[in-house]
Image: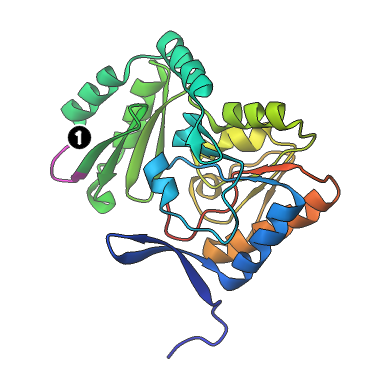
């Protein structure tokens, strides 16, 4: 039987004709309130195409960050100056994407590899059958990658291999510079969000995801007990309360819709 206590959900993403991502109806109510009180900056590892599939109940944000910081969207369009800065850092500070892809092709087993993808010509990720993934494979990949200036993150069925210089925090600092913001608030659940949380003035970590699994903590980051869509709703409450004390604070790394990646 349906649970009367379960939150009512609003679908915010449809993919290939099927509902994919959700927020609670309460979160949908809180989002416009937050966007009116602060500079709300969606921040994600998603590509631009994947990000644009999401339909949040707020006007198009002035700034958004996609591809783990690889693209800074201004009024929905990628900023070319930021693209050039990112390209320069990647060329100078890490091994090329082609070398990483070649290594993945040599070491990934078709028995558990479902898809092999490149995101925005910036980083690679694999979709895997996680139950069949060999013990130690991700750890070995991470050790190989770090020597070449790359980092690895396992999120659900996806293994991300991302250049270490490609960070959300760098893009958020650029947003803060352009907007003149005095306070940055952030939330995130994966290892790819750790740099963002560390760079923020205050942060929140939900009870699910890589960071929770590893017990990751920082003095200014609050570890929440809530998980899933309930965590997203609670994070919005915390953002709104904290931003009320500092109008126009940028709010990057907002809670992702349930089911998104």
Q: Is residue 170 left or right of residue 111?
A: right
Above or below for 47 versus 57: above
Q: Examine the image and state in which quarter residue 184 appears.
A: top right
76 or 130, nearer to the observer: 76
Residue 120 drawn at (x, y percent): 35, 32
Residue 130 drawn at (x, y percent): 28, 50
Mainly helix, strand or loop, the magenta region? loop
Q: Residue furthest left?
A: 110
Above or below for 103 versus 125: above
Q: Examine the image and state in which quarter residue 118 appears.
A: top left
Q: Which residues are magenta?
A: 109-114
Residue 242 drawn at (x, y percent): 79, 51
> Which residue is painted at 47% across and 29% down in the image?
70
- Does the segment drawn in magenta span residue 121? no
142 or 198, nearer to the observer: 198
Q: Mark 1 — residue? A: 108
**Residue 215 can be seen in this image:** yes
> Which residue is painted at 75% across and 56% down in the image?
240
243 or 226, nearer to the observer: 243
Q: Is residue 197 left or right of residue 158?
A: right
Above or below for 64 versus 234: above
> Which residue is painted at 54% across and 79% down in the image?
6
Q: Quadrant of the N terminus?
A: bottom left
Residue 159 drawn at (x, y percent): 34, 40
Q: Is residue 233 left or right of residue 83?
A: right
**Residue 234 can be seen in this image:** no
């Amino acid at each position: 039987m349906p649970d009367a206590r379960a939150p009512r959900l609003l679908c915010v993403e449809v993919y290939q004709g099927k509902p994919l991502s959700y927020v609670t109806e309460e979160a949908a109510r809180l989002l416009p309130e937050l966007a009116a009180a602060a500079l709300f900056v969606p921040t994600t590892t998603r590509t631009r195409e994947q990000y644009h599939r999401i339909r949040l109940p707020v006007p198009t944000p002035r700034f958004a960050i996609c591809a783990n910081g690889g693209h800074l969207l201004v009024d929905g369009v990628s900023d070319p100056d930021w693209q050039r800065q990112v390209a320069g850092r990647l060329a100078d500070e890490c091994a090329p994407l082609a070398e990483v892809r070649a290594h993945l092709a040599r070491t990934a087993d078709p028995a558990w590899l479902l898809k092999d993808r490149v995101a925005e010509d910036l980083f690679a990720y694999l979709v895997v059958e996680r139950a069949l993934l060999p013990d130690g494979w991700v750890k070995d990949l991470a050790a190989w990658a770090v020597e070449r200036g790359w980092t690895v993150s396992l999120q659900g069925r996806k293994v991300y291999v991302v250049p270490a210089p490609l960070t959300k925090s760098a893009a958020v600092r650029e947003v803060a510079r352009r907007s003149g913001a005095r306070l940055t608030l952030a939330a995130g659940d994966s290892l790819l969000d750790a740099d963002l949380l560390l760079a923020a003035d205050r942060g929140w970590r939900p009870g699910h995801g890589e960071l929770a699994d590893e017990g990751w903590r920082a003095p200014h980051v609050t570890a929440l007990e809530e998980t899933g869509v309930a965590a997203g709703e609670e994070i919005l409450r915390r953002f709104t309360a904290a931003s009320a004390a500092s109008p126009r604070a940028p709010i990057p790394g907002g809670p992702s819709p349930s089911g998104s990646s």
